[in-house]
Amino acid sequence: MSGPLIPEFFSADSSSFRPSAIRAFAHLINDPRIISFAGGLPSPATFPAGMIAEVAADVLRERKEVALQYGPTAGLPRLRGAISSIASARGIRCTAESVLISTGSQQALHLVATVLLDPGDVVLVELPAYVGGLSAFYGRSAQLVGVRQDEDGIDPADLRSKAAQVRREGKRLKALYTIPNFQNPSGRLLSAARRAEVLAIAWEERFLIIEDDPYGELRFDESAVTRPIAADDPELEHVIYLGSFSKVLAPGLRCGFVVAAAPILQRVQLAKEAADLCSGMLDQCIVDEICERDLLRDQIARVRSFYEERAAALLTALETSFAGRAKWTDVRGGLFTFLTLDDESIDTRALVPRAVEAGVIFVPGSAFFVDGSGANAMRLTFAKEPDDRMREGIARLARLIS
C-alpha cells in the first residue's frame, strides 16, 4: 500500500488556488429554513423548462448523431454563428470564426487565464470584483491589483495610476478584468464615458481588457447604456469578450462563449482541447435550436420582468430597514445589490454565524476585495427568494446588526 500523498507532488500553481467564499455557503443556500441572499443562482422560476423539454426531445429525435457525439472544440458551427449575431447586435464586429463556445463562462475565464498569464503577471481587478474571476487568476499565480469604483464604475484616474505603478515596479501588466454591466458583486453599471476612457487607457498602457458580460441582457432601465467595451475595439486588439446563456436560459445548460481576435482564440482553442476536447454537444444543440427558432427574445423579456420586480422588492425592504444606517446600489439590472454599512467598525464576516442562527445568509463584502477592504459590506442577491421572504430576511439582518 502506498504512503500518503506528500506536498512535493503538488504543482506550484496549485498552492495558489483559493476557495470560493460563495461556494462555502452552498449547503445553506437551498436550506428552506434559511432565507438566502448569498448565492447568485438564477431563480428556477425563470427556467423555461417546458420549452427546453420540447426542444431537447426534438434534438434527440432528429439530431442525435450530433447531440450525443463528440464535437468541434470551438463549438457547434451554427451556434457559433448565432452567438456572432448576438454579439454583432450588441455592436461587436465579429464572425462565427471569432467565437469559441465554452463550458459556461467560468471555463472561459479559466482558459483565458491559462493562455495569458505567467506567475507574477499582474491583473487589474475592480474593487470589489467577482470571486470566480479572482479564482481563475490566482490559479495562474498572478498578482491581483485592485482599482477603485464609484457609482459610475471603474475610476479611470485610479486605473491609470495603478497601471503606471505596476510599470514603475517593473512588473508585467497583462490585463484588466471587468464586468461593466450590472457588476457582480456591486450591481454597478460602468458609464458610457468611462467605457471609452477605460479602453483608451488600455491602448496607452498596452494591456488587454477581459470584458465579462453575463448580465447585460438583464436590463430593467431602458435608458441604461450596456454597449460592450468590445464594440469600440473593432479589431478586438485590446478586448476579450465573454458571455453566457446561464442567466437568461438556465445554468444547467453549460454554454458560455469567448469572442476574441484570431491569435488569442487559436490559443484558447488549444487550451480547451487540453481541458475537455469540447463542450457538451447536447447542451449546445438545445441552445442552438432555441436561437434558431427565435425563442430567446421572449425568454429574455420574461426574465427581465421577473428580476425587475424582485429587485424593486429588495430595494424597498432595504429602505424600510436600513435607511440612515447603510448605503446600497440602486440597481438598474442584473442580480445583485451591494450594501455598505455606515458603521465601519462592523466586520460582516463575524456576523455570519449569528445570521445563520437567525435563519438568514449573505456573502461578506471582504470576499470581493483584493486589497483587504470591504469588511463592513455585504453582497445581496434578489434572485432566489420571493418578496415576502426577502422582506423578512432583510428585517432579520437589520435586527442582527442592531
Image (spheres, rainbow, N blue to C red):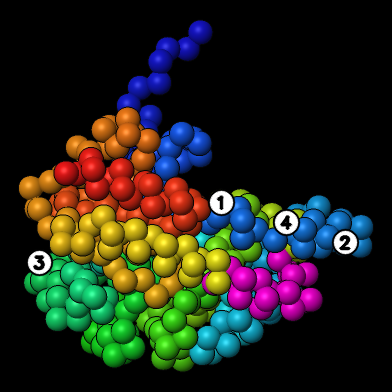
Number of other residues with Cα within 10 Å of mark 4, as a class: few under 14, some 14 to 19, many 20 or more: few
Q: Is residue 191 magenta?
A: no
Judged left or right of residue 318, residue 166 is left
- Name the spot of residue 325 as percent of width and height, x first: 16, 57
Q: CA distance from mark 3 to mark 1?
A: 34 Å
* Residue designated by label 1: 275
Q: Is residue 294 magenta?
A: yes
Number of other residues with Cα within 10 Å of mark 1, as a class: few under 14, some 14 to 19, many 20 or more: few
Amino acid of disc 1:
Ala
Q: Secondary structure at mark 2?
A: helix
Residue found at x 28% / y 45%: 397
Amino acid of disc 3:
Glu
Question: Would residue 397 be seen by someone viewing this image from the given angle?
Answer: yes
Majority secondary structure in the magenta region: helix
N-terminal of the pair, mark 1 or mark 2, is 2
* Residue designated by label 3: 169
Number of other residues with Cα within 10 Å of mark 3, as a class: few under 14, some 14 to 19, many 20 or more: few
Judged left or right of residue 242, residue 290 is right
Kindly indicate the quadrant of the structure image that contains residue 49: bottom right
Q: Secondary structure at mark 3?
A: loop
N-terminal of the pair, mark 2 or mark 4, is 4
Residue found at x 46% / y 34%: 33
Q: CA distance from mark 1 to mark 2?
A: 30 Å
N-terminal of the pair, mark 3 or mark 1, is 3
* Residue designated by label 4: 49
Residue stretch rendered in magenta on the structure: 287-304
The single residue placed furthest to the top in the displayed view is 1
